[in-house]
Image (cartoon, helix red, strand yellow):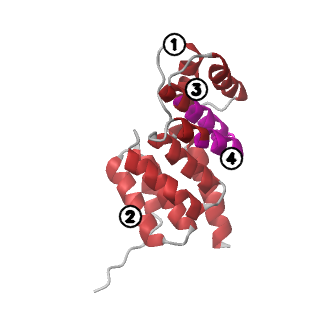
């Protein structure tokens, strides 16, 4: 029963944090910038995915902007729980720009959404190692993964790190409130 409750809580946490996923800012006008703004905005409409697709098909993009647009489209897919489509976009972004931390971090989040907790950890760790704009969100996701693996101690420390990095963010504070910590002497 605890596993079912955690699973429902996990999906709720991912959905609630969907607007906070690690998007990639693309500037310079055009469809790629519109796709970037859609990912940042927290919107979920399918038409916004089509804007990203059109950008990828029609615009001349640098590798960074192409990978960023793939990440942003993946975020839009992830918000609609299209896990396979999002994973495909993040994997392609990694292929195009292997040093883009956001691509790994988001692919890790998709693995969590698919209840593949152990599979998420290498991607989340790689995203943190490469650097992301919002590491607190990656620590939060990694804490969710650790909880899915029944590693409460690691989850606790990652929720703490998320609070340390983003003290005004309520989600990790809420998760920490569930823990009871006892010190062994």
**Helix, strand or loop under label 2:** helix
**Helix, strand or loop under label 1:** loop
Contact flag, marks 4 and 3 (Cβ < 8 Å): no
Start and end of the magenta stretch? Answer: 68-91
Contact flag, marks 4 and 2 (Cβ < 8 Å): no
Residue at which label 1 appears:
29
Give how far apart the Cα atoms at labels 2 and 1 are: 41 Å
Mark 3 residue crowding within 10 angstroms, few (<14) / some (14–19) / many (20+): many
- Furthest residue toward top: 29
Quarter of the image with the C terminus in it: bottom left
Q: Earlier in the sequence, mark 4 or mark 2?
A: 4
Residue at which label 4 appears:
83
Give how far apart the Cα atoms at labels 4 and 3 are: 18 Å
Identify the disc placed on residue 38.
3
Q: Which of marks 2 and 1 is nearer the N terminus?
A: 1
Looking at the image, residue 182 sits to the left or right of residue 56; the answer is left
Q: Which of marks 2 and 3 is nearer the N terminus?
A: 3
Mark 2 residue crowding within 10 angstroms, few (<14) / some (14–19) / many (20+): some
Identify the disc placed on residue 70.
none
Residue 141 visible? The answer is no
Residue at which label 2 appears:
157
Question: For the point 54% across and 61% down, which residue is it?
Answer: 145
Give how far apart the Cα atoms at labels 1 and 3 are: 13 Å
């Amino acid at each position: 029963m605890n596993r079912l409750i955690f699973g429902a809580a996990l999906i709720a946490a991912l959905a609630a944090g969907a607007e906070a996923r690690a998007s990639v800012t693309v500037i310079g006008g055009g469809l790629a910038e519109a796709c970037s703004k859609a990912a940042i905005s927290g919107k979920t409409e399918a038409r916004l995915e089509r804007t990203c697709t059109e950008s990828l098909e029609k615009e001349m993009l640098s590798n960074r902007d192409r990978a960023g647009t793939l990440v942003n489209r993946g975020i839009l897919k992830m918000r609609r729980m299209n896990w396979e489509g999002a994973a495909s976009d993040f994997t392609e972004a990694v292929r195009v720009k292997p040093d883009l931390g956001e691509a790994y971090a988001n692919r890790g989040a998709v693995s969590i959404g698919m209840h593949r907790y152990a599979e998420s950890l290498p991607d989340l760790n790689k995203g943190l190692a490469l650097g992301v704009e919002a590491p607190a969100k990656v620590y939060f996701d990694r804490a969710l993964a650790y909880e899915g693996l029944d590693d409460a101690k690691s989850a606790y420390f990652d929720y703490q790190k998320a609070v340390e990095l983003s003290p005004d963010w309520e989600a990790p504070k809420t998760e920490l409130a569930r823990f009871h910590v006892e010190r062994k002497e």
